[in-house]
Amino acid sequence: MPLFDYECNRCDRRFEELTGPDEQVVCPGCGGTDVARQLGAFAVGGGRADPPPAGPCGGCDHPGGPGACRFD
């Protein structure tokens, strides 16, 4: 079963739900069934972050980060 993001049209709560194709979705906040499926972060291109910037080397504090000095 796929995981979908929903927003309740009754109480405006956003939530995720594992749902089958013919399954009724119920809001966990108010119990309402008038919900709208939303685009999740994964569906709109989220999920890939830039790598963290290189920090100082642990052996000699070289500003180029690990692998930039003679101790790595």
Image (cartoon, helix red, strand yellow):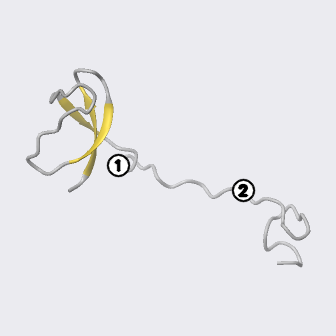
Measuring from the top left, give residue 67's x and y in whole percent: 79, 74
Q: How many marks?
A: 2
Instruction: Tell me the element at label 1.
Output: loop
Depth check: 45 or 37 in front? 37
Vertical placement of residue 68 versus 25, above or below = below
> What distance separates the C-alpha of mark 1 from that of mark 2?
27 Å
Q: Residue at x 46, y 53 (%)?
A: 47
Measuring from the top left, give residue 41's x and y in whole percent: 40, 45
Residue picked out by circle 1? 43
Residue type beneath disc 2: Pro
Measuring from the top left, give residue 3's x and y in whole percent: 27, 50
Residue picked out by circle 2? 53
Q: Residue at x 11, y 50 (%)?
A: 21
Crowdedness near tag 1: few (<14), some (14–19) or many (≥20) residues, C-alpha within 10 Å: few
| Left or right, 32 with reference to 69 | left
Residue type beneath disc 1: Ala
Q: Residue at x 23, y 32 (%)?
A: 27
